[in-house]
């Protein structure tokens, strides 16, 4: 049985969170909201508790988890050494959607880090998450609270669809505002590398550190002959709804023309088609179920809606989702990284497909 607890998302009632905090401290699993996506948490220092996360999600055990903290005193048990850049970045972006990968402490079980000698740590910017971690008294390992392979959950209803009956407690704290996961930045080596683009943009990190590298698998498809990616998560099918997703590149008019041709053809062949458009283009479509992801001039609105819309189209029972691309600047790189993977690298149109 999963207990569902509704809390006030801006001012969570401490007494409502106390049962969930005790559950974490005693080795149970608790789903909680963060500013990025919902997380499926367990005590990061309790291997048995962490094992439950992998079972509930059906997650491959070679994909490491991010550990969530509420203040810096929790670092001692997690990291062995942290570089100066850690505190510079934390000062700027924590609490917030930045995960930093640093050398791990021996106290962190191998299951959390998938046997790596590093650990990803983040302080989430959400009153419910912070209060929960504080009350529990333990650092909280938490991947996104979806069944492995599906889009990450940005609403409690997504979590309930995926994990009801598989976890001890789900805390409903409303919608996640960022809507995409944190940026994963590896600062354990000599040069910082972005392993996964996310809520903090490369431009924001570069304003602090100067030029940063972006891992090649942010752009490229992982192939079996590529060994040991630095972020094991990229090996797996991810963010994929049940429907087939086709990502279309090109100028706005090129994309609209391509999507209209394809949707007409698909509909004539008795397929149900969903179109992921934007506020600027939604009027350009003649067939299919047309939904806007948001405003191209405010790409954070697109980030906020992406996962929810992928799940919505599944609920509508569409067979094929035709999705427009967006610019890869700012948070656009994170949006496109998720879209490309949701599409399983199925990219068409006049664009830069060769770069993925
Ligand atoms: O916003 C987020 O990051 C959310 C919320 C719940 O905090 N969490 C999340 O976790 O997205 P997950 O497990 O879905 O993704 C974690 C990513 C994976 O791509 C994993 O490979 C990478 O972080 N990662 C974790 N620890 C790592 C490490 N030590 N070295 C390299 N990559 C690591
Ligand atoms: Mg995930």
Image (cartoon, helix red, strand yellow):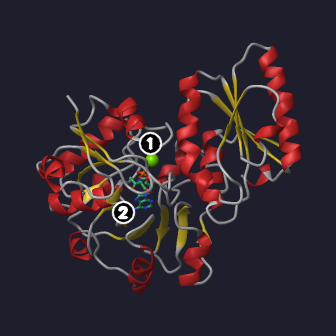
| Ligand 1 closer than 8 Å to label 2 CB | yes
**For marks 2 and 1 on the same chain, the one whose residue lies earlier in the sequence:** 2
Instruction: Kindly indicate the quadrant of the structure image that contains residue 125.
Output: bottom left
Q: Is residue 30 above or below residue 213?
A: above
Q: Of 233 and 351, which appears nearest the observer?
A: 351
Instruction: Kindly indicate the quadrant of the structure image that contains residue 57.
Output: top left
Whether residue 293 is visible, yes or no, is yes
Q: Please tell me in which quarter of the rendered image ligand 1 is found.
A: bottom left
Q: Position of residue 348 (x, y in %)?
A: 80, 40
Q: Residue at x 38, y 48 (%)?
A: 38
Q: Where is residue 264 in the image (x, y as percent from the top left)?
A: 83, 23
Q: In the rendered structure, find residue 268 and report the number of the disc placed on it.
A: none
Q: Of 319 and 274, which appears nearest the observer?
A: 274
Q: In the rendered structure, find residue 153 and report the number of the disc placed on it.
A: 1
Q: Of 156 and 229, which appears nearest the observer?
A: 156
Q: Which residue is drawn at 63% across and 61% down?
A: 216
Q: Where is residue 303 in the image (x, y as percent from the top left)?
A: 58, 53
| Ligand 1 closer than 8 Å to label 1 CB | no
Secondary structure of residue under mark 2 = loop
Instruction: Kindly indicate the quadrant of the structure image that contains residue 211.
Output: bottom right
Q: In this view, does 254 lie above or below 311?
A: below
Quadrant where the image shows the N terminus: top left
Q: Where is residue 339 in the image (x, y as percent from the top left)?
A: 64, 46
The crowd level at tag 2 (other Cα within 10 Å; few <14, some 14-19, many 20+) is many
* Label 2 with label 1: CB-CB less than 8 Å: no
Residue designated by label 2: 124
The crowd level at tag 1 (other Cα within 10 Å; few <14, some 14-19, many 20+) is many
Along the horizontal axis of the image, is 78 left or right of 273?
A: left
Q: Residue at x 20, y 50 (%)?
A: 47
Along the horizontal axis of the image, is 290 left or right of 90?
A: right
Q: Residue at x 20, y 58 (%)?
A: 45
């Amino acid at each position: 049985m999963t207990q569902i607890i509704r809390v006030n998302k801006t001012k969570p009632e401490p007494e409502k969170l106390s049962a969930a905090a005790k559950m974490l401290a005693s080795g149970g699993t608790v789903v909680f909201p963060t500013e990025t996506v919902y997380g499926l948490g367990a005590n990061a220092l309790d291997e048995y508790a962490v094992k439950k996360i992998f079972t509930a999600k059906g997650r491959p055990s070679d994909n490491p988890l991010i550990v969530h903290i509420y203040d810096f005193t929790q670092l001692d048990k997690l990291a062995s050494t942290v570089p100066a850049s850690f505190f510079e970045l934390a000062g700027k972006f924590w609490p917030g959607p930045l995960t930093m990968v640093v050398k791990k402490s021996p106290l962190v079980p191998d299951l959390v880090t998938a046997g790596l000698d590093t650990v990803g740590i983040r302080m989430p910017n959400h009153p419910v998450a912070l209060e929960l971690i504080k009350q529990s008294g333990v650092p909280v390992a938490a991947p996104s609270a979806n069944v492995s392979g599906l889009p990450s959950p940005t609403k409690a209803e997504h979590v309930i669809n995926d994990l009801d009956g598989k976890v001890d407690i789900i805390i409903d704290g409303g919608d996640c505002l960022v809507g995409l996961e944190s940026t994963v930045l590896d600062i354990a080596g000599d040069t910082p590398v972005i392993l996964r683009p996310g809520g903090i943009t490369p431009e924001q990190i570069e304003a602090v550190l100067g030029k940063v590298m972006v891992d090649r698998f942010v752009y490229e498809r992982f192939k079996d002959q590529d060994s040991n990616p630095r972020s094991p998560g990229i090996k797996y099918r991810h963010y994929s709804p049940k429907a087939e997703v086709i990502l279309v590149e090109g100028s706005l008019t090129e994309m609209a023309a391509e999507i209209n041709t394809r949707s007409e053809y698909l509909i004539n062949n008795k397929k149900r088609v969903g179109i992921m458009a934007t506020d600027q283009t939604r009027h350009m479509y003649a067939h299919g179920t047309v939904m806007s992801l948001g405003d191209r001039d405010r790409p954070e609105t697109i980030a906020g809606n992406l996962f929810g819309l992928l799940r919505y189209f599944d609920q509508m029972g569409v067979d094929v989702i035709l999705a427009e691309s967006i610019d890869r600047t700012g948070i656009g790189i994170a949006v496109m990284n998720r879209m490309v993977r949701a599409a399983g690298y199925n990219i068409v149109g006049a664009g830069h497909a060769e770069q993925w």
